[in-house]
């Protein structure tokens, strides 16, 4: 069995369609005969199950984290997508919404052992540690945004905070290195850095070995951009400009792998609690087939 390709799906802002993108993209890959797993990592407000035709998951992450089951795979349930499974979070369990770092590490380690060609980890909104820890732990990540300025700003903040979290977690026992990296978060301060490249250049003079590790971590990341609810060519162009912004300031690659046309029927399906992937739309299906093809090409050569 090959190791699964684990892809986190985030974007910072709520309401941009992360769960829609996750479920539809999984369905498109299933049509290509790939096995797909879904993990709802919105630990305080899980809702991915409603997009996948699962009314009330009988098991979920809480059973694994609490020790009621021994392996993470025991919490998986079938979805409406053939050959796929879902591990759900929970929306009403306080302890699950605030897991300890050790619990998250145990969960992340167990995810890597599950059986699927692709595993999508649907992240919560925001840029807190619970979200960025998941982002930073997997080398593949999809950034979902619409074309509105506030959404793009949130997507940029999500990516920046995820990078900061990932770089600092490389050195958990080195507060001096962590403080140095954190200077990137306040570019207007006297000793702040405006770009990741500036920070790395300065770090190389003080922490040469650590800087090599940071550069390798950044080089190993594969980030993909998907724009949702697109209405015209102007919206499409927002993605290309965002890619350039990320390249200039964050020093990571970001591949713009596609956009999704605005489709009212998807919003209707969500409001009516129908599985979004069962809402037929020729335009949307074509968008996701193209995105799935690009994702396969970039993750499998």
Image (tube, grey):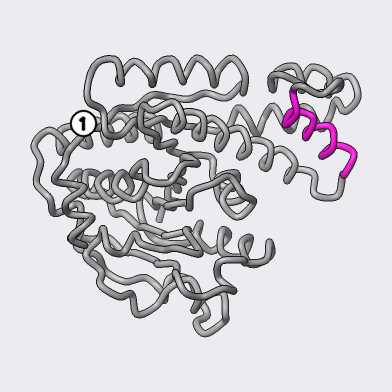
Residue found at x 49% / y 33%: 155
Residue 97's image quarter?
Answer: bottom right
Counting from the top left corner in percent of width and height, residue 283 is at 12, 33
Residue found at x 63% / y 60%: 105
In this view, the residue farthest toward the bottom is 68
Numbered disc 1: secondary structure: strand
Q: Nearer the viewer, residue 44 or 205?
A: 44
Q: Quadrant of the N terminus?
A: bottom left
Residue 7's image quarter?
Answer: top left
Q: In this view, does 246 lie to the left or right of 268?
A: right
Residue found at x 47% / y 58%: 42
Q: Which of 154 and 62 is in front in this view?
A: 154
Query: Does residue 176 belong to the magenta stretch?
Result: yes
Mark 1, residue position: 261
Q: Is the magenta stretch mostly helix, strand or loop?
A: helix
Counting from the top left corner in percent of width and height, residue 226 is at 36, 32
Counting from the top left corner in percent of width and height, residue 245 is at 53, 17
Q: Nearer the viewer, residue 259 or 113?
A: 259
Q: Dot 1 surroundings within 10 Å: few (below 14), some, or many (20 or more)?
A: some
């Amino acid at each position: 069995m090959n190791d699964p390709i684990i892809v986190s799906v985030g974007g910072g802002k709520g309401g941009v369609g992360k769960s829609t993108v996750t479920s539809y993209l999984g369905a498109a890959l299933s049509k290509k005969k790939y096995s797909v797993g879904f993990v709802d990592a919105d630990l305080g407000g899980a809702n991915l199950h409603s997009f996948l035709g699962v009314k009330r998951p009988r098991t979920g992450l809480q059973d694994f984290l609490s020790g009621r089951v021994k392996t993470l795979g025991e919490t998986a349930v079938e979805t409406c997508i053939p050959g796929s499974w879902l591990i759900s979070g929970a929306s009403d369990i306080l302890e699950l919404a605030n897991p300890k770092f050790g619990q998250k590490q145990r969960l992340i380690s167990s995810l890597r052992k599950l059986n699927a060609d692709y595993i999508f980890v649907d992240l919560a909104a925001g840029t807190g540690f619970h979200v960025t820890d998941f982002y930073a732990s997997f080398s593949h990540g999809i950034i979902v945004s619409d074309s509105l300025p506030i959404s793009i700003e949130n997507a940029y903040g999500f990516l920046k905070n995820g990078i900061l979290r990932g770089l600092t977690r490389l050195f958990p026992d080195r507060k001096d290195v962590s403080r140095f990296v954190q200077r990137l978060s306040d570019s207007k301060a006297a000793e702040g850095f405006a770009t990741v490249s500036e920070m790395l250049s300065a770090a190389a003079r003080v922490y040469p070995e650590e800087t090599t590790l940071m550069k390798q971590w950044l080089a190993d990341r594969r980030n993909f951009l998907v724009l949702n609810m697109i209405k015209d060519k102007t919206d499409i162009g927002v993605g290309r400009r965002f890619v350039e912004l990320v390249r200039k300031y964050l020093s990571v690659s970001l591949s713009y792998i596609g956009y999704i046309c605005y489709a009212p029927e998807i919003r209707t399906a969500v409001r009516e609690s129908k599985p979004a992937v069962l809402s037929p739309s020729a335009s949307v299906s074509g968008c996701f087939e193209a995105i799935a093809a690009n994702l396969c090409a970039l993750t499998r050569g």
